[in-house]
Each structure stands twice: as C-alpha cells, then as structure tokens.
Image (tube, helix red, strand yellow):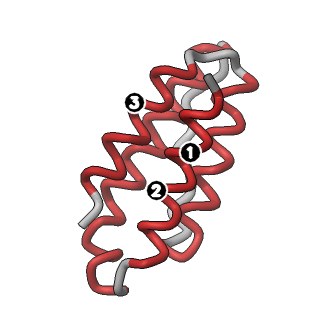
Amino acid sequence: MPELGDAELERVARRWHQLPLDRALLAYPGVRDVVQLLADDIARETGKARVPVPDLGPAVAMDQLRVMVHDWRRAGLPEGDLGGRLIALRRKLP
C-alpha cells in the first residue's frame, strides 16, 4: 500500500508549496510535530535513541518529511499508519 503514502505525501507537499508564507509559518509547528513523531517512532522501532529533528525552517519542511517517510519504510513500520498521519497533516494545513 505504498501508493497511499506516496499519494498523500505528494498532496501534502503540493498544498504546502501553495501556502502563502504567513500561513505556512502558522502551520509549520504542526508539520514539525509530525516529522518529529515519525522520527520518534522510527527510533523506537530500530532501537535507536530519540534525537530531535533539526529545526531548519519551513523552506525545507517537506524535504524533512520526505526523509522521514523514506526512513519509516526502511524501518518496516506500517504503511497504513503512515498514510493516516499524512492524511491528518494535509487536513490540518490551512
């Protein structure tokens, strides 16, 4: 079911890039939260220490999200959980 995750990731990224800067800045903490939650789950699944994802700003937020999606899959975590989180993130974007 990677198609769901891929499609949702593209929808989130497309919506993100359409946002005016002021709205993106308001939505950015929510994106960071999702990226960090994915990173935390990956760390837990792989037995690694939890490490804060660097705050690199809204310009690279989608790049960080893409990396976490890739790492999520490499860790073997459930694709359905990933898709659900991406859907929820997209719905929260203004």
Judging depth in this view, the residue of 1 and 94 nearest the camera is 1
Q: Residue at x 27, y 78 (%)?
A: 23
Marks 1 and 2 sit apart, C-alpha to C-alpha, by: 9 Å
Which amino acid type corresponds to the residue marked 2 in the rendered image?
Val
Query: Which quadrant, please, contains the C terminus?
Result: bottom left
Q: Earlier in the sequence, mark 1 or mark 2?
A: 1
Residues packed near mark 1 inside 10 Å, few (<14), some (14 to 19) or many (20 plus): some
Instruction: Identify the residue position indicated by label 3 in the image.
Output: 84
Marks 2 and 3 sit apart, C-alpha to C-alpha, by: 12 Å
Relative to 69, residue 74 above or below: above
User: Which numbered marker is on residue 12?
Assistant: 2
Q: Earlier in the sequence, mark 1 or mark 3?
A: 1
User: Which numbered marker is on residue 7?
Assistant: 1
| Label 1 vs label 3, nearer the camera | 1
Name the side, left or right, on which 23 lies relative to 54: left
Provide residue 11's location: percent of width, then percent of height: 48, 56
Which amino acid type corresponds to the residue marked 3 in the rendered image?
Gly
Marks 1 and 3 sit apart, C-alpha to C-alpha, by: 12 Å
